[in-house]
Image (cartoon, grey):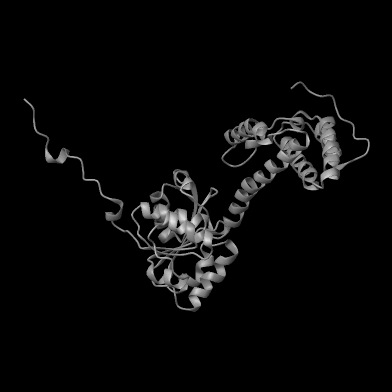
Amino acid sequence: MSVPLRSSHRRAPVTAPSERPGRLGVGVVGAGHVGAVLGNALRAAGHPVVAVSAVSDASVERADALLPGVPIVEVPEVVRRAELVLLAVPDDALAPLVAGLAATGAWQTGQLVVHTAGRYGTSVLDPARAAGAIPLAIHPAMTFTGTSLDLHRLEGCPFAVTAPAAVLPIAQALVVEIGGEPVVVAEQARGLYHAGLAHGANHLTVLVAQASAVLAGAGVDDPGRMLRPLLEAALDGALRAQSRDGSPGAITALTGPVRRGDAGTVAEHLAVLGVLAASTGSVDVLEGYRALARAATVRAVAAGMLDDTAAQRLLDVLAGSPGAEPGPEEER
């Protein structure tokens, strides 16, 4: 005989995001690539977006696409309407904006003020804090296209979170709600944190552009197709080898002429890149190669991957020392 389920065994009703407790009216200042996407993500988590500012035609289109139906108003009006103000503006514009709004008495007691600039912690929000607002800094460690393609990439994306201890859980909860992974970064470490990200992501883009230009100079019709498997394998290997404290970590995945101590190959690379630079004016490629090969040599020595003699031959070649003699090539 079947036994009816007790009421305690019934599945709890699903609560719609908008009906969850603690929902906040969000105002988005800056419908750029980041602001519109994060506003959309907060809206999906049940926080109504009550207003957005957008200046350029592109930002107006972005707001219409990602925040349909949200009124586009001036910045002071966004702040007036919102319980949570999301400041997604360029780094250099953030401090003047916060101070300017404070000077007009725009900030409200108890209002959450969240910025997305990687460079800053919460000290940049001090004028708002002095008016009674609650300062939070959250920075997603990813690049944005400003389209709906970014939304699924927020899942599991690390966010640097900085806030006064008493309200740090609020910042962490906001990140979790939009699918991210909060990583606490100290106020005084934000500049270093951002430099690390910029050095890795931005300069990787430059490196790919330079490598593509060199391959094009060699007559390769589709440099991206040739680079993709090599670069994807190199990046994967470096990230897998990376230690938690940053050393020696990723450098142990190094391959190629520096790893083998092939000073002769490095000298040849410098020579042909010099010819390319002379014919195309792309001096940055030659200097970029020289700087990164030098850094690779220093790190390989520190990790015990290269002996001092081989390293000195490489450094002499990279410095352009006359008569620098390459050593015997090791087996690949």
Q: Is the N terminus in the top left, top right, bottom left or bottom right quadrant?
A: top left
What's the residue at 59%, 53% (across, down)?
A: 194
- Is residue 138 visible to us here? no
What's the residue at 46%, 73% (across, down)?
A: 130
The front one of 169 and 97 is 97
Residue 218 lies left or right of residue 180; in this view the side is right
159 versus 105 height, above or below: above
What's the residue at 77%, 41% (across, down)?
A: 289
Residue 132 found in image quarter:
bottom left
Residue 301 lies left or right of residue 146; in this view the side is right
Residue 149 picture location, percent across and down: 48, 45
Residue 266 found in image quarter:
top right
Residue 299 lies left or right of residue 95; in this view the side is right
- Is residue 179 visible to us here? yes
Outermost residue, left direction?
1
The front one of 200 and 228 is 228
Q: Is the C terminus in the top left, top right, bottom left or bottom right quadrant?
A: top right
Residue 88 picture location, percent across and down: 50, 60
